[in-house]
Image (cartoon, helix red, strand yellow):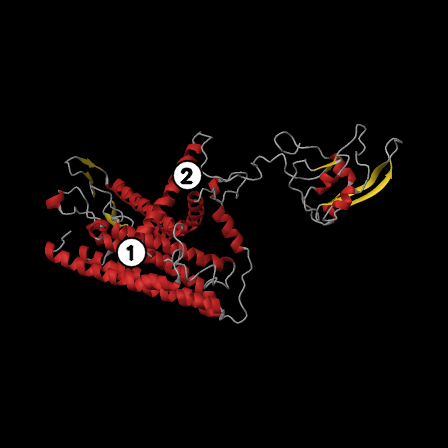
Amino acid sequence: MILDLGIIFGRVAFAIMFMLNASAILGWVERKQSAIMQDRIGANRASIYGFRLIGLFHPIADALKLLTKEDFMPARADRLLFQLAPFLSVFFGLVAFAAIPFGDVLVIGDRVIPLQAVTLNVGILYLFAMLSLGVYGVMMAGWSSANNFALLGAQRAAALMISSEIAIGASIMGVVMVYGSLNLQDIVRGQGTPLFPQWLGGWVPAWGILTQPLAFILFLTAGIAATKRVPFDMPEGESEIIGYFVEYSGMKSGMFMMSDFLETVVIAGMTVSLFLAGWQVPYLAPDGFHFPWGAAVLLPQWLVAVLQVTAFVVKVSVMIFVMMLVRWTLPRFRYDQAMRLGWLGLFPLSILNIVLTGIALLLLGGWAP
Amino acid sequence: MRLGQRFYLIEVVQGIVLTSGHFFRNMGKHLAHAFGRKDARGAVTIQYPEERRPYSPRLRTLHRLVRREDGSPRCVACMMCETVCPARCIYIVATEHPNPEIEKMPERFDIDLGKCVFCGYCVEACPEDAIRMDTGILEFSSFSRRGMIYTKEALLALEPAGKDGRPT
């Protein structure tokens, strides 16, 4: 009983620690990556006893600075909602990751531990719901600040969220149709099966990016829009309206920044789970490597689990790298351009993707991973 | 917009190819630097207080008063620099020089560097080549306005910059 509780606690702790540490490190990654992309060096001055450690102390210094700043509240603000908003934003960002599997199963003795914080049959719907709920924190912040610019930012965030969430949901449907499940763990398992074994002979695993290339692009675009970061940062729009968090100071402002990073990690995790085969290592079965040319390397189960978790973390890191690359490459879309892209670009294309997937599945006689 | 541009995707990919090219090239140089190749530089940044770019020999930096052999100022308090100064930051009080062959010397020679615009007219105007702006000192600051006023003694104590343009 105690052991079961401990195992559950450990699974949840892994997901939470992964998210919190990732969001802290992302601040550093963002600074350093943008600097290297722009031929600069980036923040490297924070030091402890002369050790700079390529600027890794900057997140700590930032957090300390934000925690010691004045926590200001406008006189006419709605006190309860104003306080609640940043916590809601961070909360939904954190809990969203619970449904993403970071490994298959870990067998210790006769216990089979699923490597996922919460095993949900409808993991995708849960993720989708948590992502959508994240915008409530933003809208609360904008409304309760009693500031017109904040309200404008919140309105933009709501409009952007609706137009991107629809595209996210519709593009996910193609993946759900192909793998025949709403359970993320099942979808990831399905991506380990060979793609067209009758023609390709088991050389190519059926990763989502191969079975659903259009949905991948649509999901990634809409996902970047859902994180409210450049090129879809009209809710912040630093040069025109400062954004929904204009009245926030200190760590509460930092929490909004953190929730952006959390959403980045969630979107990266979703992309990896849905399109890049999550924790799958190519040719790695539960008992070791089975290569298509016949060779096999048998591995102990714990090593397989470690490899899977490592593969998941590496894939998420690569996805975050790609999203940062996009963020530091593109300029911001104008508000109407983003709306047009969402409603006239992503949404019809994702519906088209569903139709095409349906036709393909019909012609191929169904996909049976 | 051309049709290709209307789809964004091609342009986005082109942009990402450009920026990621920069990223990987610079990252490679940074790694080479970390593993011993000290001539590889992944960034154009000059880490300012530790590293400085070479200064031009013509750069106008903090003034100094040139000394005679005996250590007294070469300045003869002719007031040319005070007159020509557009910022009116020089204040001179003249006095007799102990040597009867030299007519005058400054008793006070104050430059208010808070006002100085570093135009160099004082150097050009000086008939005795007694004031120069070649110390190479660019960073001077003070917590008070009074601290920005450099007196005769302070200006006399300054040395010209070395061959590399750095303060000596």
* Residue B154 percent location from the top left of the image: 75, 38
The subunit letter for the residue under badge 2 reads B
Secondary structure at badge 2 equals helix
- Asked whether the beta carbons under mark 1 and mark 2 sit within 8 Å of each other, the answer is no
Total labels: the figure holds: 2
* Residue type, label 2: Asn
> Which quadrant of the structure image shows residue B150?
top right
Q: Quadrant location of residue B109? A: top right
Q: Is residue A164 visible?
A: no
Residue drawn at x 47%, y 62% as measured from the top left: A240
Taking the view exactly as shown, the residue that stands out farthest to the top is B69
Near-viewer residue (A28 or A79): A28
Q: Which mark is residue A152?
A: none
Task: Name the kind of residue labelled 1 in the image.
Answer: Leu
Callout 2 environment at 10 Å: few (<14), some (14 to 19), or many (20+)?
A: many
Q: Which residue is mark 2?
A: B26
Task: Say which of marks 1 and 2 sits in front.
Answer: 1
Task: Find numbered disc 1 in the image and state the secondary structure of the residue it sits on.
Answer: helix
Kindly indicate whether the residues beneath marks 1 and 2 are on one polypeptide chain. yes
The reply, left or right, for residue B83 in relation to residue A85 is right
Residue B3 — which label?
1
Residue A272 pos. (x, y %) = 29, 50
Q: Nearer the viewer, residue B52 or A104?
A: B52
Q: Position of residue B40 (x, y in %)?
A: 45, 32
Q: What residue sits 16% from the left and 39% below the top?
A: A292
In the rendered view, does A292 fall on the left or right side of A135?
left
Q: Position of residue A244 (x, y in %)?
A: 45, 64
User: For the residues marked 1 and 2, what is the alpha-carbon distance in whole angstroms?
Assistant: 34 Å
The chain to which mark 1 is attached is B
Mark 1: few/some/many CA within 10 Å (<14, 14-19, 20+): few
Query: Between A329 and A69, which is closer to the camera in this rendering?
Result: A329
Image quarter hosting the N terminus of chain A = bottom left
